[in-house]
Amino acid sequence: FKMARALGIDPLVLAFVTDGLKTHTSEEQIAVEESVLSYLQQTARPTLLRTTHEKFLRRGLEGLSSGYQHLDASHPWLIYWTIHSLDLMGVELTPKEKQSCIDTLRQLQCPTGGFAGGHGQIAHLAPTYAAVNALAVLACPEAYTLIDRKALYGWLLRLRQPDGSFVMHEDGEVDARGCYCAISAATLCGILTDELVAGTADWLTSCQTYEGGFGAMPGCEAHGGYSFCAFAALVALQQDTRVRKTDLLHWAAMRQMRLEGGFQGRTNKLVDGCYSFWMGGIFPLLHRSLAADEHTRVQLQTLSMRWLFHTDALRDYVLLCCQSPHGGLLDKPTKKPDFYHTCYCLSGLASAQFFFEESTLSAGDLNVLKRIDPVHNVAAEKVVSMKRFFVPS
């Protein structure tokens, strides 16, 4: 948007073209663009509202209202979304806050392995991933040793299917999330083995669609969240050479909305702040993979020193359109802030701020966030700390 205006081009040429045919989808897209335009036309430099977001997140650690009861199966997620967001902004937890998180996660660990989403519930891969990530963020021996790695490994083996896929819980559904959650948790805990992931790379590769992205399982439509999960898992397994990377790059780049600057998760869907990470987070992984390939390395060297999407446009969408003045970040204008979107808007912004290990911002920039590990979505320094604790070099 701002680039078009700087070049003397009417930004409205970036708007959605209806071709004279109105549908529910086109009307929603036009309404979103109209709401976004008023924010993008601001001339002031976009600034991260760090203090208001910190207050919003810390209130969540103190306790949640009854309106959050629908997230009773997401206790580890709520902890991870909150403390990861604070950590990205460089906010230190108090000893009391740390201990409260550890005590809660300890109660959610199942004796047969893995973590449940809530009290009295069964172990599930999604909250297990969130719990392990949260413990990585806490970065202390008490958090690390809480994990029953032997039970976790046995449970993961029971979830693994003969074709290499993983069910989300015993007798549960199969999808690419399961592979990613299992591989990410096992990697951080130092229990990833050939036995655990036999056939997994083959199964994940079969989820790549004709579009270039990855679906939840073979034959499904390409989706931003599943694409990140599948590709990140393959990168963690060092099996990304199996991927049609040029097709993935084209599909992922086309998900960045022309006017809004943020990402959609699927073709013909609306922009959503959470895809700042689920889509934007694919590019650091993909860039590294392409740079390691002798056939694409030369082409990359001719490009500017940025990821292969418009990082400034994403920054403007997140900072101008997705910040609540009362704290927290959100899906899009007219929506309310929540911990999920706060986490993934900030994660996407953090990912866009670095090119490999180098920050693209000047020292002292008020918007600067910590560098994340692109596979796990945890601060890079915290990932190194946890891995070294379990597998000393």
Image (tube, rainbow, N blue to C red):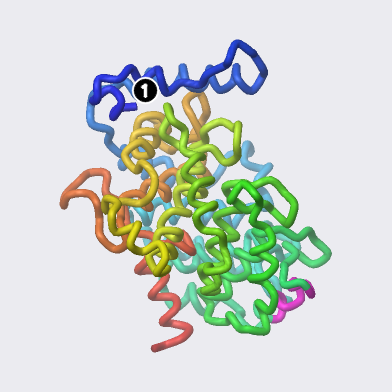
Dot 1 surroundings within 10 Å: few (below 14), some, or many (20 or more)? some
Name the residue beneath numbered marker 1: 39
Q: Is residue 141 above or below residue 341?
A: below
* Amino acid type assigned to the residue bearing label 1 in the image: Tyr
Identify the residue at horizontal 39%, vertical 74% (top origin).
384
- The magenta segment is 154-162
Answer with left or right where residue 297 lies relative to residue 62.
left
Q: Position of residue 377 (x, y in %)?
A: 46, 59
Answer with left or right where residue 184 lies relative to residue 113.
left
Q: Position of residue 308 (x, y in %)?
A: 38, 49
Q: Position of residue 271 (x, y in %)?
A: 52, 33
The quadrant in which residue 91 appears is bottom left
Identify the residue at horizontal 42%, vertical 23% (top origin).
14
Q: Is residue 158 magenta?
A: yes
Answer with left or right where residue 88 lies relative to residue 27.
left
Q: Position of residue 208 (x, y in %)?
A: 64, 56
Instruction: Find the residue positioned furthest to the bottom.
Output: 393
Identify the residue at horizontal 64%, vertical 13% (top origin).
21
